[in-house]
Amino acid sequence: MWTYEKKLQFPVKIKNPNPRMAKLIITQYGGPDGELAASLRYLSQRFSMVTPQAIATLNDIGTEELAHLEIIGAMVSQLVKGASLEELKRDGLDAYYVDHDRGVYPQSAAGNPFTAEYIAVKGNPVVDLTEDLAAEQKARATYEWLINMADDPDVIEPLKFLREREVVHYQRFGEALRIVQDYLQDPHLFVIPKPDFMK
Amino acid sequence: MSEDKKKLELLEQIMAIDFMVIELNLYLNTHPMDKDALAKHNSFAMQSKMLRESYERLYGPIAQGSTSAYPWQWIKEPWPWEYEANPRLSREGK
Amino acid sequence: MADDMIKNNSYHMGNCIPQETTIKDVKLARAYVPFQKMCSIFSPIEALKRGTIFPELFSPYDNKEKKYKSSEKNR
């Protein structure tokens, strides 16, 4: 189960409102390669995963993605807070404002609402981990495009942090896939694997 | 506002130590036999515990399940997604 | 990105290589990501700023496309 800690994983301290960036960054809240998709995907896949290592990896990375969801929400919130209606309109957020005021609604940059169609839970361990590797790459690329679009250091710092997390997660899912592949090959040899390089 | 400054400095330390813990947690999930990583994880976990105790003594609960002074401190603002609740990371080196 | 990570691999203590360099029994139609091995780690504030505690996984992004965007039109 989950408890809540009253701190962000990485600080978000954005002094200058920027509705244009808010409109883009929100895609990592409710978009196809965003943190809501990631956490829901991993936390759902863990029920049918095999090996303690891979299950723990899905469990804990899924949990970390919820913390990232919160960071994105904080960024969007701070970017629109204090923006005037003229600024919202100029930056293309007037349609969003009409439906959500300055609230944070799970949608992509293009305005598509979040859907479970963004995730897959195939139930097969190799398939699911392969999907997870792809998901981390897509998220990393998205953060790179967002960083390309930004010029405020207050905005770039958390985006760079989140991008680096995707690199690390890719490595972890890659390792989990190795462990699962070995397990599926020789389950009777499997307690906790101890390949030579780990000694 | 030096009280708030101290609060944010302590929070920054907790954020940094907790980050060490979580990174080592993920590493250990796929490397459960790495003794060195386990030792580091436990050491940072103990540091985190001590820092949180200091923080909570002065500023109230940081996690659910911690005790609170009167009146109920958990609902106090600012909440973590607000500008004022966040430290600006120290710019030491790169 | 791979280049930056290889450069960062020189940041290791003595003979500690932070990953496996060969993989045994590779089979067709499978993906293999090499296992990482912890050698040294960043200090807490450094780690938080970079987004990882491991130098070998740190992959700096410095807006390369942003810099080159205007020159691409000349091709």
Image (cartoon, rainbow, N blue to C red):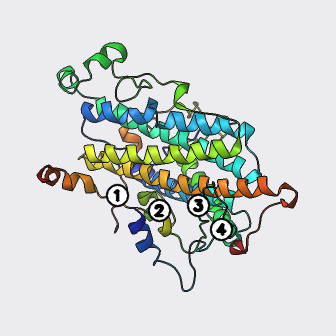
Which chain letter goes with mark 3? C
The numbered mark at residue C47 is 2
Have a look at marks 4 and 3 and say if they share a chain.
Answer: no
Foreground disc of the pair 2, 1: 1
- Name the outermost residue toward the top: A98
- Name the outermost residue toward the left: C74
> How far, Cα to Cα, is label 4 from label 3?
20 Å
* Local SS, label 4: helix
> How far, Cα to Cα, is label 2 from label 1?
16 Å
- Per the image, the residue denoted by label 4 is B37
Viewer-nearest residue: A6 or C10: C10
First in residue order: circle 1 vs circle 3? 3
Foreground disc of the pair 1, 3: 3
Pointers 2 and 1 in contact (CB under 8 A)?
no
- Give the residue displayed 39% in from the left and 67% down from the top: C4
Which chain letter goes with mark 1? C
Pointers 4 and 3 in contact (CB under 8 A)?
no
**Residue A105: percent from left, percent from top:** 42, 23
A16 lies above or below A177:
above
> How far, Cα to Cα, is label 2 from label 4?
15 Å
Quarter of image, res C45: bottom left
- Per the image, the residue denoted by label 3 is C33
**Residue A65: percent from left, percent from top:** 54, 42
First in residue order: circle 2 vs circle 3? 3
Q: Please, what is the three-letter code of the amino acid marked with disc 2?
A: Ala
* Local SS, label 2: helix
